[in-house]
Amino acid sequence: MKKLLCGLLAFVVLSITHVSAETREDSLLLRDDYPQEYVVVKGDTLWHISGRFLQSPWKWPEVWGVNPQVDNPHLIYPGDVIYLTWVDGKPRLGVRRDSGIYPRARTSPLDQAIPAIPLRDIISFLNDNRVLEEDILKDAPYVLGGKSARIIAGAGDRIYARGSLLEEQRRQGIYRADGEYVDPDTEEVLGFELTKVADADVKTHTEDVITLDVVKSKKEIRVLDRVVPTEEVRIQSIFYPQPSPDGIEGKILKVLGGVRDGGQFNVVAINRGVREGLEPGHVFAIYRKGERLKDPVTKEFVTLPSERSGELMVFKVFEKVSYGLVMQSTDVVSIGDTLRQP
């Protein structure tokens, strides 16, 4: 009976619509206005392309992960034609590619491939922002000043710092603390956010004074900025989205960029990290806290239920804090919004 039912559902899907995708909770739900084909253009992302077909774009590995037509189903290129097909009654996205027109995709596929999410919105946070725990930050050397007692320095200047290097390496980063992260529920100090202001090379290192030559700077270097080893970060363009770990909920600590509220493609900091098992690619649903209304009858204040307002994907993880990119939003994303498994 079960096989017969599956067969009937597959027949209906193939001939009419995506009914089978809606008859089971674990099936992929298609958009009502999904296209039969889509031509990839420069500037697209896997999330964006999947969003043209799926109600939950982050589930693209489920439609591309078993695609036999390409060596790596996550590498899609401008000019590729993405088309909808069905396998055993389930939607699949196929790729039609004219290799004669796009030979460069074969020679340098990683440079030409469509990224998973818009890198332009996260690249500075991948390179220039980090979160350090309190004890590590306290141990980091601090800037005393520049040559001729200058308190501000930039590229080409020599500066001096006091303390012991966290790691003995020539290239060091000059970072500025932008505030601490405190868990809103437990009041635990989760770490301090640092923004890179410059790169410098260690010239000499005496007992407790470090001489550094500033190689390049993004902002002026100030007294008390910290000297921290430069992260060797390889820009990750392909992420493999997956639901956040079971039982792990969180909250938005900050909307980065100097604003309190955000929306699609804003970067946010959340109060969960490696300690809770988070990895780049984990997806959370965002729930906005319900408003408080005054009951006109009882005159009491009533808090309305929280409502789902978007989705974010984690792209950089620290010990107790992570950065995520808001991929979809139907309402304002704010500090204190709750995160749950999507």
Image: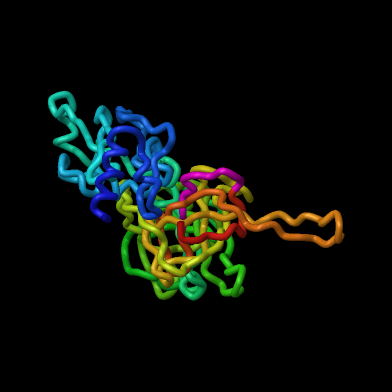
Query: In the image, residue 219 lies at what x, y percent?
Result: 51, 47
Q: Which quarter of the figure has residue 109?
A: top left
Whether residue 65 is situated above or below residue 42 in the rendered picture: below
Look at 26% across and 55% down and name the residue there: 1
Report if residue 325 lies within the magenta region. yes
Q: Which quarter of the figure has residue 32?
A: top left
Figure coloring? rainbow
Taking depth in this image into account, of 270 and 222 the one nearest to the observer is 270
Q: Please indicate, yes or no, whether residue 257 appears anywhere in the rendered image.
A: yes
Magenta highlight: main SS: strand
View extreme (top): residue = 101
Query: In the image, residue 254 lies at what x, y percent?
Result: 57, 56
Query: In the image, residue 85 lies at what x, y percent?
Result: 25, 37
Look at 61% across and 59% down and name the residue there: 336
Report if residue 63 lies within the magenta region. no
Which residues make up the magenta segment?
323-332
Taking depth in this image into account, of 100 and 151 the one nearest to the observer is 100
Q: Does 43 sit left or right of 131 as displayed?
A: left
Q: Does 287 sit left or right of 19 as displayed?
A: right
Q: Please indicate, yes or no, whether residue 123 appears anywhere in the rendered image.
A: no
Taking depth in this image into account, of 130 and 161 the one nearest to the observer is 130
Q: Which quarter of the figure has residue 46?
A: top left
Q: Does 333 sit left or right of 21 as displayed?
A: right
Query: In the image, residue 34 lies at what x, y percent?
Result: 39, 33
Look at 32% across and 42% down and name the residue there: 115
Q: In this figure, what is the number of numbered marks?
A: 0
Look at 35% across and 50% down and name the residue there: 27
Taking depth in this image into account, of 340 and 193 the one nearest to the observer is 340
